[in-house]
Image (spheres, rainbow, N blue to C red):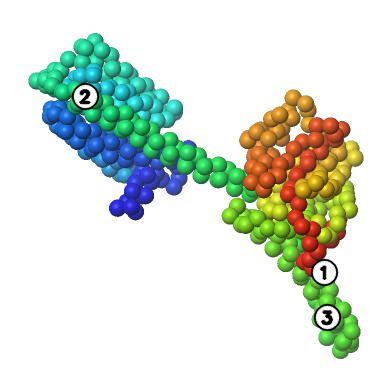
């Protein structure tokens, strides 16, 4: 049963559908599931309250909503939604006339009519228009006729206790539908945000591809060169042990360099949000980012300046995520510096009590004053269409908040200067700490 409930939201969703359309159909299915359960509860409430005719009419509602779900499963998505809207509203109209205005059933009816806006997307304007007009017609009919029963139906005689019970159940049912609807909406929104963050990350990785290829290609050429020398020595018979030792050592160093690049690439590409916060070397965090920026900067004649950073300095956090933040800032700095005349980027780190501040300054013209309050907003970007997603700084800000730090634009700097503030570690000297080699 649990597995079935998990599969139902996917009914009618096809792989080739655009994400927004697929999510819309999933939401429709979830609403139909909630309304199926809600209509069963309300039928029992009507029967327990003595509104027998209303209970009989409402007993068809679960089958209507379930039928809509089956039509969704078979691919008749538009027919399913029209079927549910017309039959459910018609049945709801009849129930309202039987129980009367005092039972507050019209509020459930009102809440359900709002589903028509969710059932049909804005692109389906004719179906949406029909759905809204049909709901308004039902409400207008109730008010004009003063909830008078028709076609052989009679007004149910309800006691004070029955009315009170019915009103209480109406409020509870509406509350349950709202919680279920908005809970699912929040969940889908969180998933969409995670997908957008992942997409932004992949865009940044794609922009680094040329630099990564350059970083790997040069060491590979050196390995090929050393291998050719060994092959020549073997063919000529002039094999000297000391030369073999030197060449083997150089090949090992170069191979370790490639392994380091690949390891860093795998680290940056994976999801590190569940990794524990730990003490990591500041130089290691910075080097992991610079591994994918250095070749790109050199190919565009952008000078990289790195201030002196003591090897023993450590920070508390996730190395991969902190490197991702620095990489995002470096990417923006590169875009600004490459368009300027001087073309340079400077990285510095300073102590600030229990925190360490990492600053990234570029030779660009700076951020305009009217844009400074917007640059951390999701999807805001000053870059041309197709070049930026507007998520880099927003994602970076979220990462730093989780780490107990923050990222900010230094408005007092004449150049564009971002300051990343990270909690400081215990500055323990460890053998695995790498010196910056910019």
Which residue is labeled 2 in the image? 163
Residue 185 appears left or right of 137: right
How packed is label 3: few (under 14 Cα within 10 Å), some, or many (20 or more)?
some
Rendering quarter of residue 29: top left
In the image, is residue 117 above or below residue 387?
A: above
Left or right of 87, for residue 250: right
Which is more foreground, mark 1 or mark 2? 2
Which residue position is annotated with label 3? Answer: 230
Residue identified by numbered label 1: 222
Left/right of residue 314 with respect to residue 85 in the rendered view: right
Farthest residue to the top: give it. Answer: 144
Dot 2 or dot 3: first in sequence order is 2
Determine contact: label 2, label 3, CB under 8 Å.
no
Q: Residue at x 87, y 79 (%)?
A: 246
Quick check: marks 3 and 1 in contact, CB under 8 Å? no
Viewer-closest of 369 and 281: 281
Element marked by disc 1: helix
Picture residue at 67% right of the left edge, 51% below the top: 321
Evaluate whether residue 220 shows in this view: no
Label 1, residues with CA under 10 Å away: few <14, some 14-19, many ≥20: some
Residue 398 image point, x, y percent? 64, 42
Number of numbered discs overlaid on the protein picture: 3
Give percent across and percent down for residue 372: 74, 30
Residue 68's image quarter? Answer: top left
Q: Is residue 400 above or below residue 3?
A: above
Q: CA distance from mark 2 to mark 3?
A: 96 Å
* Left/right of residue 102 with respect to residue 225 in the rendered view: left
Query: Does any portion of residue 46 appear in the rendered image?
Result: yes
């Amino acid at each position: 049963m649990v597995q079935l409930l998990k599969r139902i939201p996917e009914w009618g969703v096809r792989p080739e559908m655009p994400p927004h359309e697929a999510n819309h159909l999933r939401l429709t299915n979830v609403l139909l599931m909630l309304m199926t359960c809600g209509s069963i509860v309300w039928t029992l409430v009507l029967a327990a309250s003595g509104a027998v005719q209303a209970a009989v009419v409402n007993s068809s509602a679960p089958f209507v909503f379930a039928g809509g779900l089956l039509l969704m499963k078979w691919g008749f998505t538009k027919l399913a939604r029209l079927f549910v809207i017309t039959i459910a509203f018609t049945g709801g109209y009849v129930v309202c006339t039987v129980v009367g205005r005092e039972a507050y059933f019209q509020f459930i009816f009102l809440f359900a009519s709002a589903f028509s806006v969710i059932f049909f997307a804005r692109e389906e304007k004719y179906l949406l228009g029909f759905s809204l007009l049909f709901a308004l017609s039902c409400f207008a009919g109730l008010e004009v006729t003063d909830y008078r029963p028709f076609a052989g139906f009679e007004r149910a005689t309800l006691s004070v206790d029955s009315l009170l019970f019915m009103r209480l159940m109406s409020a509870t049912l509406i509350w349950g539908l709202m919680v279920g609807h908005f809970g699912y909406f929040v969940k889908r929104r969180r998933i969409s945000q995670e997908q957008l963050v992942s997409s932004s990350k992949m865009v940044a990785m794609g922009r680094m591809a040329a630099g990564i290829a350059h970083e790997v290609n040069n060491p590979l050429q050196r390995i090929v060169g050393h291998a050719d020398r060994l092959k020549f020595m073997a063919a000529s018979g002039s094999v000297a042990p000391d030369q073999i030792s030197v060449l083997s050592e150089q090949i090992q160093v170069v191979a370790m360099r490639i392994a380091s690049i690949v390891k860093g690439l795998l680290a940056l590409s994976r999801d590190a949000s569940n990794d524990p916060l730990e003490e990591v070397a500041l130089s290691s965090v910075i080097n992991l980012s610079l591994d994918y920026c250095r070749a790109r900067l050199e190919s565009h004649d952008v000078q990289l300046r790195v201030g002196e950073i003591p090897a023993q300095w450590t920070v508390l956090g996730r190395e991969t995520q902190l490197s991702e933040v620095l990489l995002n800032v470096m990417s923006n700095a590169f875009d600004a510096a490459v368009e300027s005349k001087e073309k340079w980027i400077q990285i510095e780190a300073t102590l600030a009590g229990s925190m360490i501040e990492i600053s990234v300054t570029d030779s660009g013209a700076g951020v305009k004053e009217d844009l400074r309050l917007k640059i951390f907003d999701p999807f805001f970007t000053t870059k041309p269409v197709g070049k930026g997603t507007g998520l880099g700084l927003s994602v970076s800000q979220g990462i730093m908040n989780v780490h107990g730090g923050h990222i900010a634009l230094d408005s007092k700097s004449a150049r564009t200067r971002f300051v990343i503030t990270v909690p400081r570690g215990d500055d323990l000297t460890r053998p695995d700490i790498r010196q910056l080699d910019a």
